[in-house]
Amino acid sequence: MKISALQPCRPFAAFTMIEIAICLAIIGVALVGIIGVLPYGMNTQRDNRQETVIGQDANHLIELIRNGARGANDLTNYVYAITNSWAFYDSNSNIVSSGVNSYTYLAAKEYGNSIPLRALFTGTNIIGALSIPEFYTNTPSGWHPLPNVFQGGYSNHVVAYVRSISGLAAEKPPQDNQIMREDTFTYRLFVVNAPIVQGPIGVNFAYNQNFGATLHELRLTFLWPLLPNGKTGSGRQTFRTAIAGDLRPDENNGWFYYGPQTFTTIP
């Protein structure tokens, strides 16, 4: 159809350059805000995941230690080092000597001596190392836990280095990728098997002795994540539980384990 020159042309609807620039400015401001909040959301998700892993691992380890587990060999894939910083006190509560016992999958060193059979190549050895009492002494009849070291004995500070037991399936063994293994969520674990404080002498002394020998407080303090430089991040959480039962060394390997829940053993 031919348009007559006398017929006016109808204008076409469109955005001007100014309107487009204003729209882009609004979108840009919104994107900047979203991008700024995104890292906080990702960090919160990461922290929640790590706290969930810590809670699951804590429940698992507490039950293994509480029951004196002897066959949890799967732990060898996760607990790769344990140290025990010890100090020996004389009868006057003075430190006579101190040192660090170290345990890995391939080697073990105690009080300056190499003891390969105490290495962490079995779950039994790992649970035994994690069950070392806070205080103990060596007598002709063997090692025995102590309520304190006021009259002498060994004070122990046990630290384990653990790759997360629960968590991402891609991090679990068998994993041959060295980069993946190094990026696995790892934490430092402080383990304390503390005796229950006894009452004063003369006030139900026999009961307090019996109570203190067969009831301990297990404290697991998790510090995470473990960084490449050996330091830990800001994550920290402590789990506590009371364990009834004898804490005595096994006559076959010398490690300490919780025994039957009984209150009839008097030191």
Image (spheres, grey):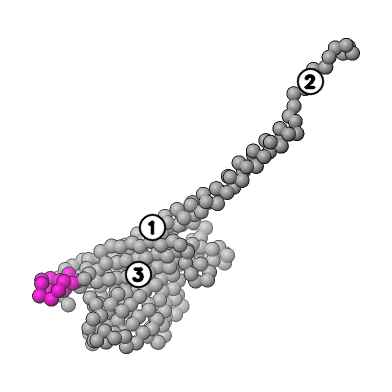
The spot of residue 119 in percent (x, y) is 41, 77
Rendered position, 193 above or below 13: below
Q: Amino acid at mark 1?
A: Gly
Decide which of tag 1 and tag 2 comes sooner along the chain: 2
- Which residue corresponds to mark 1? 55
Q: Residue at x 37, y 69 (%)?
A: 190
Report how far apart the C-alphas of labels 1 and 2 lie in the structure: 68 Å
Q: Which residues are magenta?
A: 198-212
**Residue 32 highlighted magenta (yes or no):** no
Location of residue 113 with respect to 127 vertically, above or below: below
> Dot 2 surroundings within 10 Å: few (below 14), some, or many (20 or more)?
few
Residue mark closest to the camera, 1 vs 2:
2
Q: Position of residue 189 (x, y in %)?
A: 40, 68
Whether residue 127 is visible: no
Q: Are the two marked residues, 2 and 3, in contact with CB atoms closer than 8 angstroms?
A: no
Instruction: Judge whether residue 5 can be spotted in this image.
Output: yes
**Residue at (44, 61) in percent of width and height:** 235
Q: Which residue is mark 3?
A: 191
Q: Is residue 240 left or right of residue 56?
A: left
Mark drawn on residue 257: none
Q: Secondary structure at mark 1?
A: helix
Of the residues shown, which amino acid type is indicated by label 3? Val
